[in-house]
Image (cartoon, helix red, strand yellow):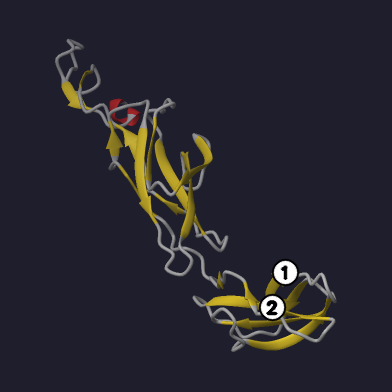
Amino acid sequence: TMYGSWSSNDPESGIVEYQMAVGTAPGQTDVAPWQSVGLRTSFTRTGLSLQNGVTYYVCVKARNGAGRWSEVGSADGILLDSTPPTTPVVIDDGDSTSVLDSLHATWRSEDPESGLAEYYYCVGTSPGATDVRSWTSAGLVEGVTITDIKLDPVLRYYFSVKARNKAGSWSAVGASDGIGYSTGAAIWSKFRGDQANRGVGLFNATRVSDVA
């Protein structure tokens, strides 16, 4: 289907009829021929054979009371995009981070037909979860660093991203593979290599379970 609306006037004899057509260029009728719509100033053409990735134009002409037709007016065109953007590829900063108050990720999606209009992202403790950051618009920016957070050192965190194209279709949600906390530093421990509890056994802990 294709919808169009329009207006015209004739101060002398008035408008007595509009006709509407649809084409792949302004003024063309190669998709749907001229059809009278009476004095209606909007109309939806149905039963059309439309193809993805093609721009279509609604064309209208008006006839006055003296029987004269106006020039053809055409809309600025609408690109048919029936496919969503690709699922965003989301990349965080690796398997672990040494800070507990910030997270960073980048992402990318594509839509070759109508193009991308917006990204949304969220952050949570599982793919698609929003328990750290609810869905937030990033515009067309393909990455973010969030700093107003406090991470739990025993959990992993996931960025999830979806993309919307200019036709209004949303992609599937893409997610990072998760990132957790690691101190990256030596820890004094009585649990490993320090049976006398002298505080001289050092090891690198990446999870709380490592010190059990």
Q: Position of residue 20 (x, y in %)?
A: 71, 81
Q: Residue at x 39, y 38 (%)?
A: 156
Q: Position of residue 21 (x, y in %)?
A: 67, 83
Helix, strand or loop under label 2: strand
Crowding at dot 1, Cα within 10 Å, few <14 / some 14-19 / many 20+, comes out as some
Q: Nearer the viewer, residue 82 or 70?
A: 70
Q: Residue at x 47, y 63 (%)?
A: 85
Quarter of the view holding residue 37: bottom right
33 lies left or right of 154: right
Q: CB under 8 Å between callouts 1 and 2?
A: yes
Q: Which mark is residue 60?
A: 2
Helix, strand or loop under label 1: loop
What distance separates the C-alpha of mark 1 from that of mark 2?
8 Å
Q: Is residue 139 above or below residue 98?
A: below
- Three-letter amino acid code at the position of disc 1: Trp
Q: Which residue is mark 1?
A: 6
**Labels 1 and 2: the sequence-earlier one:** 1
Q: Nearer the viewer, residue 211 or 29?
A: 29
The residue lying furthest to the top in this view is: 198
Q: Is residue 32 above or below residue 189?
A: below
Q: Is residue 20 above or below residue 142?
A: below
The residue lying furthest to the front in this view is: 12
Q: Residue at x 78, y 70 (%)?
A: 9
- Three-letter amino acid code at the position of disc 2: Val
Q: Position of residue 66 (x, y in %)?
A: 83, 84
Q: Nearer the viewer, residue 10 or 21?
A: 10
